[in-house]
Amino acid sequence: MANASGYLFVLLTIVLTVFGQIAIKWQVAKAGSLPIGLLERLNFISHLLLNPWILIALFAAFLAAVSWMVAMTKFDLSHAYPFMSLSFLLVLVMSNIFFSETVTSYKVIGLIFVILGIIIGSQG
């Protein structure tokens, strides 16, 4: 049962991490391009940092870190960390769904290697 709860915390870490990435991309895309001038850039960034969705994404990152700390009480780092690569797969799928980002054959091949790495790296 200890391993099952450990995997649950690893999964929670991944989900919170992916959520944060998607939420930040969504809000940054809505905000537009980074301005050229220094003061305009500082204003742009400060508005983003006060954006409720950005704050939620940052809080999700904090919760992901807490979840990861709990997971680290259950597993060796070398066993658990390869599972974090699943975030690459989820971000690729979500970025295609939400932002119409292109999924190329190179990205798919790369993800196949990542998944094979997870399978191999999590053994033993």
Image (cartoon, rainbow, N blue to C red):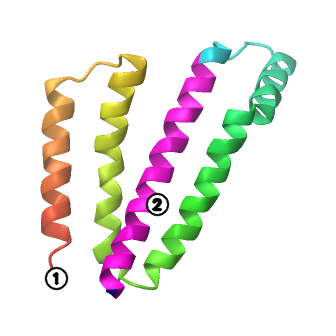
Q: Which of 97 and 39 is in front in this view?
A: 97
Which circle marks residue 13 in the picture? 2
- Percent across and percent down for residue 11 are 38, 61
- Percent across and percent down for residue 22 are 49, 34
Q: Is mark 1 on a helix, strand or loop?
A: loop
Q: Which numbered mark, 2 or 1, is in the foreground of this view?
A: 2
* Placement of 39 over or under 122, stated as above or below: above
Dots 2, 1 in contact, CB < 8 A: no
Give the distance between the C-alpha atoms of the residues marked 2 and 1, in whole angstroms: 22 Å
Residue 10 lies in quadrant: bottom left
Q: Nearer the viewer, residue 102 or 14?
A: 14
Q: Which residue is drawn at 13% across and 37% down?
A: 109
Q: Is residue 51 left or right of residue 117?
A: right
* Placement of 84 over or under 27, stated as above or below: below
Q: Residue furthest front?
A: 1
Q: Residue at x 35, y 87 (%)?
A: 2
Which circle marks residue 61 in the picture? none
Inspect the magenta stretch and tell me whether residue 15 lies in it. yes
Specify few, some or many for label 2: CA neighbours under 10 Å numbering under 14, 14-19, or 20 or more: many
Q: What residue type is labelled 1?
A: Gly
Q: Which amino acid does label 2 sit on?
A: Thr
- Percent across and percent down for residue 1 are 31, 86
Q: Earlier in the sequence, mark 2 or mark 1?
A: 2
Numbered range of the magenta stretch: 2-29
Q: Is residue 7 left or right of residue 48?
A: left
Specify few, some or many for label 1: CA neighbours under 10 Å numbering under 14, 14-19, or 20 or more: few
- Percent across and percent down for residue 124 are 16, 82
Q: Is mark 2 on a helix, strand or loop?
A: helix
Q: Name the residue under label 1.
A: 124
* Placement of 36 over or under 124, stated as above or below: above
Q: Which residue is drawn at 49% across and 50% down?
A: 17
Q: In this view, does 84 lie to the left or right of 59?
A: left
